[in-house]
Amino acid sequence: MMTPIPVRRLIPQQTTQRIQKIVVLTPQRASGPRHEASQVDSTSSTLRIIKVFTDPDSECVATQARVGDGVLLVSCTDGLRRPVHYFWSVQDFVKGLVGALRGHQFLAQSGILHHDINENNIALARRPGGERGFLIDLDTAVSYEYPWTPAQVDTQWKSYHSSRLASHPFHSQRTGTAPYISISVLDNDHWNSHFDDIESFVYVLMLFFVSYKGPLSARELLAADERCFTSMVTVNRSSHVNSWSSVFRSWTLKKGVTRAAGSKSLLMTAKAKHMVTDPFYSVVAEHWEKDLLPMIQDLVDSCLTFFHAAARRHYWGHHQQFIDALDAWLEKYPVPREGHNNCPFDDPETKQQAV
């Protein structure tokens, strides 16, 4: 039986309430195979999906096989979600990314593929301490037989391609949010796998620095927290948001799938990555504070390095490699540089501004 990973939390989103309710899934060790879940509103498509995957009577064989030794506790909490848009610092965002990756890792190993990794499906904790990042929104999640190598992904693609097209003639092979879709899925090389979702996390990381020029002020962040991060319709675009340059606008597929796939292929090729990273670092240098540039470059380069190393060995990056790269960066840069931490709350233990 599979041993659950140390951090095991996922937050899917329930959008049927005026103030968002977040469903926290925390698998825990148990003496016997059983699943527990709270009664939920049947109008929520996300929660219906959760029920399919966690119901012991479900036909989801992969899920039963891999989560049979755990308890799945489901609870609802109001106002837990903080969108990435309201990040406090670069460190705050990276901690959130680590938490989302761990949630995705547990899901994939449990027989569920998220299928739509993008910035809007990653949530940050509203308060410092504890878990800092979560994965939300299971509306496109699918039952998944966890393959441990890319070769197994290719085998599954060849085996199931004809039968799935026959049984689901209107099912789209290319699933995800355009700028974050992996190269293989853009090229329709195979069905989405967890490797494709991991690649999407890289694009979340890079596009974060393209989309923003730093956090909002502590005063603005506190005001957003007090209104539960609801948008103010009369307010123009936030001052910390950038427009994407032409290189990254191509990832939206407005200029065609081929151009997007080609740009990402260059990025994921060690000898050609500069064709994408050079304009990327130009954008970062233009919009982010100068003293943050070495730290940002170190972060992005370290994450790309393991993908390039994986490509040389003809396999894709795994969850733990990505998590280790992010953790190593957080160890090297544990706190934001002076003047670059806008967290509006104090740490409950130190009584100092939280990181």
Image (cartoon, grey):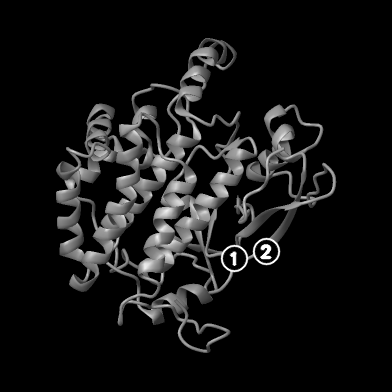
Residue drawn at (40%, 82%) of the image: 219
Residue 2 position, x and y percent, is: 68, 40
Which image quadrant is residue 145 in? top right
Residue 272 vs 338, above or below: the answer is above
Residue 116 position, x and y percent, is: 48, 40
Residue 172 vs 86, above or below: the answer is above
- Residue 170, numbered circle: none
Name which residue type carries label 2.
Answer: Thr
Q: Tell me the quadrant of the picture where the N terminus can be found.
A: top right
Q: Are marks 2 and 1 in contact (CB under 8 Å)?
A: yes
On screen, residue 7 versus residue 96, left or right, reads right
| Front-most of residues 214 and 236 | 214
Q: Name the residue beneath numbered marker 2.
A: 77
Which image quadrant is residue 75 in? bottom right
Residue drawn at (75%, 53%) of the image: 73
- How many angstroms separate mark 2 from mark 1 (CA)? 6 Å
Residue 119 position, x and y percent, is: 42, 52
